Amino acid sequence: MKYATIPSAQTVAHYCKTYGIKDIVISPGSRNAPLTITFTEDNYFNCFSVVDERCAAFFALGMAQQQQKPVAVLCTSGSALLNYYPAISEAFYSDIPLVVISADRPPYKIDIGDGQTIRQDHVFDRHIGYSANLKLDVSHATETIRKQGKGLLEANSTIAEQQRKIELYNDKELAHAFQLAIEQMSPVHINVPFEEPLYNTTTTPNQQPVLSYQKPVIDDVEDLTSFAATWNKAKRKLVLVGVEYPNAVAQEYLDFLANDASVIVLTETTSNLHHPNFFTSIDSLIAPIEKSANSDELFKKLQPEVILTFGGLIVSKKIKSFLRKYKATAHWHIDAKKAYDTFFSITHHFKTSENTFFKAFIPLLTPIESDYYAYWSTVKIKYEEKRNQYLKQIPFSDMLAFSTVAKTIPKNYQLHLANSSTVRYAQLFSIDPSITVFCNRGTSGIDGSTSTAVGASIYNKEPTLLITGDISFLYDSNGLWNKKIRPDFRIIVFNNDGGGIFRILPGQEDTANFETFFETTHTVDIAKLCSSFDVIHEKVDTEEILEKALINFYKSSKKPKLLEIKTPRLINDKILLSYFDFIS
């Protein structure tokens, strides 16, 4: 086995092993050669080559998301590193342990007017759990350092003594970064400076410290007696759940909440929680109230005394608007790490896991007579009936096509949703409980949806389906530039010739400026793009053809498949807005 001769390259790989990080996503370059050699020559690591750094970072993010453990992404020096930023910010807000490793020039070569010598240290500090900026080895390329690195070498100390100090410093920084990534589920950045030569190897590894690490188990909760007393008195309790990893919350606790007459549970597709009594289409509940002549009266009837929230970010703008105006007396959030005050109303943060909280909380609860759930469940039944009626009378469109797609996704599939209109349409329809749902809701950006889904599919037992809009898909089309895409990977693209979601927002929808700078209409041929990446392509533009195409779409194949659903650009917004009028 070969190792890079540069000590810090071996040390970084050693710490990856110590902390159980096997998956390394590598983008090509020269400055990162010592790390690339060390990782790829070691059978312990699973190395993936992804050329586009932005795609590589989202690909790694998808793998880390699914495995709930760190995945490393490695690039060369310079602007390559900056392409990681969108995925890093997503990892930061979604609590995904992405380990970013960047090669760098020596410190004395930064800002001297040389190529790719940008300031890499602390570059992500506003959106990173920790920045470990390693020190340059002085036992490697010592003469070059002596000539060019003024003041870097100590006059009264041997090279061996200085190198030992550097290694102790680097060991400490690496241990801290890896521990934080694992314990806090946070992205970290490790910046490693290298001096040339970069490609020299040895068959004898450096002596590395023998370390062992075990993630600490935190399983405690504060005294809940007073909170239980407040809960037991309230006749209107609202439980609102954002993004949740599948099976994160024990079903027995969910069943308890679902069967409490004083509780209504609002979930989203990305919550991955299921019960017949849950309200899974929040906007369908809120919109009719907004349009009602006695909206204030109805909103006060819905207004909770206590709000209990857990999970990640919420998609529905309507529920945010409602809860910001009609505040509860108490708003509690459960999360071991953080609590975003989305509704400007948080009164307490339980710093523990959902299961730990409910295990301690539920035995303290007593039922109270209430018509809260009973009243709003009749409202739910009515809007579900009206939605079915509406779907039978509308023409082929995004909404009708999404309804058809949602009903036909095979059981046990992994479903990834792009942001913008895709994830919002998904909130209107039920999806089989066996299907696990993911979406990059940390920052809610359209960048990286395809790459994330491809990464998430790598170790998933069942096939993966990505549903995306045309702009999101085209934006991340390099996500298909990946040799590891599985033949059972499926993509459905809703192509309405632009960013159709902007047509439902107030604006000058029929002007040339709107179409160019907001809707961003295009004439890109998705079939040709699929041909470039060796993906099977099929295009449909009617409900009948779509239903037939979906039958074959999920059948096994030797290549991944993409189904392009062409919908009319100018009516999708009107059909969606009319839906809310119809159910009102």
Image (tube, rainbow, N blue to C red):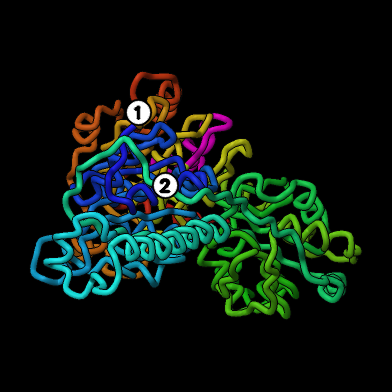
Residue 561 numbered mark, or none: 1
Q: Position of residue 395 (x, y in %)?
A: 40, 42
Residues 444 and 277: in front is 444
The C terminus: image quadrant: bottom right
Mark 2 residue type: Gln
Q: Is residue 367 among the parts visible in the rendering?
A: yes
Residues 440 and 27: in front is 27
Residue 20 located left or right of residue 566: right
Residues 553 and 580: in front is 553
Q: Residue at x 30, y 70 (%)?
A: 157
Q: Is residue 355 magenta?
A: no
Residue occupied by mark 2 = 207
* SS under mark 2: loop
Q: Position of residue 226 (x, y in %)?
A: 85, 76
* SS under mark 1: strand
**Picture quadrant of residue 162:** bottom left
* Alpha carbon separation for disc pair 2 and 1: 49 Å
Residue 390 located left or right of residue 526: right
